[in-house]
Amino acid sequence: MTRIAKLAVVSVAAIAAGLALTAALPLPGTRPPAGGEGYTVPVAVPSFTSANQRKAVADFSFADGAGAPRSISAYRGKVVLVNFWATWCGPCIKEMPALASLQTKMAGLPFEVLALSQDRGGAAVVKGFYDQQKITNLKVYLDQGGRAGSSLGLRGLPTSVLVDASGREVMRLEGTANWDDNAIVTAIKQVIEGL
């Protein structure tokens, strides 16, 4: 075997070993598997923009589960976590129970999780998913044609944008989070309190 061939074999073996090790480790912000022995992973709290540096979110439209038009401006006075997701997006599916739990933890506060589905199958697909997952406290909302996502510069799924009661962007996260984690709930409550 030539020296180049030996280097290629060693390189491929090293890459494979690295991928195997990476696959066995949890991703940052994830919870340990059942039992949780062996490690703990801290939950990262997304970075929030201070009140004096927040920029207004452009008004955008979407539809509710009945097809009626809605607008983000109608939510002024509430803090809204806009979550772009789809039933075909694996990370989105894993994140939805935490979003539903967050909505439950924030009950009675001027707050709403606005889960905007990117599914082309419409409300029936989202309702079916919610029924299957036993999600009863999130409303069906659709980003028909991707206009809302385009307005906010959506680059991938899931993406979440926290909007304060004045309609300004507080935080943007591309990827998943444990939204019902106490540190995140506390940070969102501070936004509700105007901090």
Image: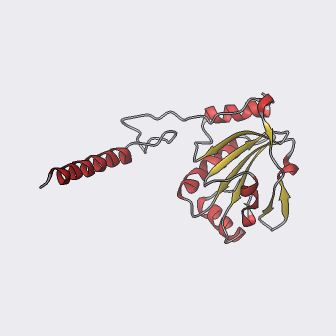
Residue toward you, 166 or 183: 166
Give the x, y percent position of residue 96: 61, 52
Indicate the position of residue 15 as horizontal and vertical percent values. 30, 48
How is the structure coloured here?
Answer: secondary structure
User: In this orientation, which residue lies closer to the viewer: 173 or 151?
Assistant: 151
Task: Please tell me in which quadrant of the rendered image residue 92 appears.
Answer: bottom right
Residue 102: where, in percent of width, then height?
67, 43
Where 92 falls versus 77 (above or below)?
A: below
Q: Residue furthest left?
A: 1
In the displayed structure, would residue 83 be above or below residue 185? below
Place of residue 39 in the rendered image (x, y in percent of width and height, measured from the top left): 39, 34
Position above or below: 154 against 34: below
Residue at the (79%, 62%) spot, across then down: 64
Left or right of residue 177: residue 171: right
Quarter of the image where the C terminus is located: top right
Horizontally, is 17 left or right of 96 in the view? left
Residue at x 71% of width, y 35% of height: 188
Q: Residue at x 61, y 55 (%)?
A: 156
Rendered image quadrant of residue 131? bottom right
